[in-house]
Image (spheres, grey):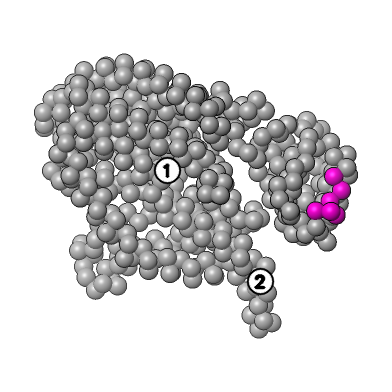
Amino acid sequence: MVMKYLQRLGRSLMLPVAVLPAAAILMGIGYWIDPSGWGEGSPIAAFLIKAGSSIIDNIPILFAVGVALGMAKERDGSAALSGLVAYLVTTTLLSTGTVAMLQGIDAANVDPAFGKIGNAFVGILSGIIASMCYNRFHSVKLPDALAFFSGKRLVPIMTSASMILVSVVLFFVWPPVYGALVAFGEGIAKLDAVGAGLYGFFNRLLIPTGLHHALNSVFWFDVAGINDIGNFWAGTGEKGVTGMYQAGFFPIMMFGLPGAALAMYHTAKTAKKKQAASLLLAAGFAAFFTGVTEPLEFSFMFLAPALYFVHALLTGISLTIAAIFNWTAGFGFSAGFVDFFLSSRLPLANQPYMLIVQGLVFFAIYYFLFRFLIVKFNLKTPGREDDEAGSETITAAPGKEKFAVMAAKIYEGLGGDANVTSVDNCVTRLRVEVKDMKKVDKQKIKATGVPGIKEVGPHSIQVVVGTNVQFVADEIHKIRK
């Protein structure tokens, strides 16, 4: 049950995740043009960096909207709006300025944890709660005096109220959790190469929660006196040691994750290879060139959490190996080719070319290990989700008329308004809830030329349409209005 829920969450993230690779590449090119000023020395670089960062910096908002839309029973705009409302309520109530007012103290004295409240975890949590509110309240009818706020208009209102309660909980829970991670980071920093490995492992493991920022601050910045990034680029430190909390990421981001992307592409179902390739190729290139891995990691993080755990382990191993052999390179943006090229000639860079050798080995490890695990345990990576199994693509003549006719016949076969309670769609299938399965005329539905029909519960049925399913679903929603 939990795995099914996580896979559904993973599919919901596909819409916002698909936007990220292009944004990452824009930022990488901009940073390449102006690596030191980040746009201060070049209008072109500034334009590219700001264009990319407008998306990358707002990943939590994209997740809040995308998850709310994907997890709701119907893909309705009020669900997406509620996801945004949920996120804004929480991040505003728990912002540094608001907390300072609530506590009656100066903003400089507010717990630093609240400065990191706008993270992916809060975005995903906001989307989940918004979808729950939509599923519960979108059809509620209020008394006549309040009728204007009935139904879908009630959803963002109830979402706001729910997130106020969530914010109260986070007000007390978030700071100690954040502080504990900072203390944990300071502890493992004393373990040298092993500590670097543990840091790499937990860095990846904490990505879904946004709490990796707490850990990063210990090692990358001057929270505990390490300041690995600052010292490396300033040339102040010990050659072969300074940069140890950065170097091991290069083999993973430039080579390991692209290897994983290739494995996921090769194990995708035949009918879905092209679709999987469009996401995985862009995300893999973004990881290699810019070091931005979220597009790729979030594509399988929830679909196959066990695989993501393996990825976190391999990241830890990579950092340990690089630290043991004193191979160092650094980054100002992320551990991609751009930063590797720029940092490899700095004074504290030590045998950086060996990170390329290590990366080639990790490419092979990721590819073969991921491919083996995906096939062996039938893991639901992009292109292998249950909702897409056995699907085919319908080749239809251009134009909307065919979809309108097809939708009308399918809807009639499902029993029409009298029997259908909700209609949603995934990548290839209509997912329909009906009152009485006996009233469904499967022969009438099959006569439209759909590849298949599948009952998945006493009141749930899926109609396999193909990659044109969205157009058919849109036409059905028009019929239902």
Query: Measuring 32% from the left and 54% from the top, which residue is drawn there?
Result: 116
* Secondary structure of residue under mark 1: helix
**Count of residue discs:** 2
Q: Say which quarter of the image contains residue 99.
A: bottom left
> Compared with residue 142, is residue 291 higher up or lower down, i.e. above or below?
above
Residue type for callout 2: Val
> Does residue 438 show up magenta in the picture?
yes
Q: Name the residue under label 1.
A: 56
**Image location of residue 104, percent across then percent down:** 24, 73
Residue type for callout 1: Ile
Q: Mark 2 points at which residue?
A: 140
Q: Say which quarter of the image contains residue 14.
A: top right
> Compared with residue 294, is residue 395 higher up or lower down, i.e. above or below?
above
Q: Quarter holding the C terminus?
A: bottom right
| First in sequence: mark 2 vs mark 1 | 1
Q: Give the range drawn in magenta.
A: 437-442
**Image location of residue 276, percent across then percent down:** 58, 30
Query: Measuring 45% from the left and 37% from the top, which residue is drawn there?
Result: 306
**Image location of residue 431, percent across then percent down:** 70, 48
Query: Measuring 83% from the left and 47% from the top, which residue is drawn there?
Result: 410
- Name the dominant secondary structure of the magenta segment: helix
* Secondary structure of residue under mark 2: loop
| Circle 2 crowding by C-alpha within 10 Å: few under 14, some 14–19, many from 20 | some
| Circle 1 crowding by C-alpha within 10 Å: few under 14, some 14–19, many from 20 | many
Q: Is residue 243 left or right of residue 99?
A: left
Residue 136 in sight here:
yes
Q: How far apart are marks 2 and 1 (CA)?
A: 37 Å
> Compared with residue 333, is residue 10 higher up or lower down, i.e. above or below?
below
Residue 339 in sight here:
no
Query: Measuring 40% from the left and 33% from the top, which residue is drawn there?
Result: 310
